[in-house]
Amino acid sequence: YNTKRARGSSVMMEAGLANQLAGVSPGETSLVACTGNLIKNIVGSSVLTLASGVAAFSDSPTSLAPSLLFGFVFAMLSAFCFSILGRTCGMTAAKSYAQIWERTMGTGSAWFISCILIFKTWSAAMIYSMII
């Protein structure tokens, strides 16, 4: 019995049920599911990188203060960027990065943002596979 497969399928069923209850059609994700996934990704990556980063440059407890300051600054920058992204989605009634790009920059170069997102996703997967 493969427990990993069973957990993965139950998570997929829960996500499908949540999307069904939220009235989201297949192939789309509800706002709640997206927010949950975003929080899991941010928390997961922060837990791994902050601890290893602090341990890499000092054993002293006082080195935690600058690390937390940097973490806070980057969290505020991230929040600002997500806020701008949300406002842009609201103004353009877009549901994806490609739609935002098409509606603000034109359709001729919309392929460019899709290529960047594919590369970003691929590189993040490679980085996490190295951590694990």
Image (cartoon, helix red, strand yellow):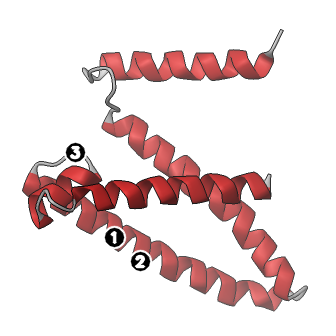
In the rendering, at what x and y percent does residue 26 appear?
32, 20
Q: CA distance from mark 3 to mark 1?
A: 16 Å
Side of 77 where 103 appears, left or right: left
Q: Residues within 10 Å of mark 1 (few under 14, many from 20)?
A: few
Type of residue at label 2? Answer: Leu
Residue hosting label 2: 77
Q: Secondary structure at mark 2?
A: helix
In the rendering, at what x and y percent does residue 18 appear?
40, 21
In the foreground, 33 or 65: 33
In the foreground, 129 or 37: 129
Residue hosting label 3: 95
Q: Which mark is residue 81?
A: 1
In the rendering, at what x and y percent does residue 117 appear?
41, 56
Q: Are marks 1 and 2 in contact (CB under 8 Å)?
A: yes
Q: CA distance from mark 1 to mark 2?
A: 6 Å
Side of 116 where 65 appears, left or right: right
Q: Does label 2 or label 3 sit earlier along the sequence? A: 2
Query: Depth-wise, is mark 2 or mark 3 nearer the camera?
Result: 3
Type of residue at label 1? Answer: Cys
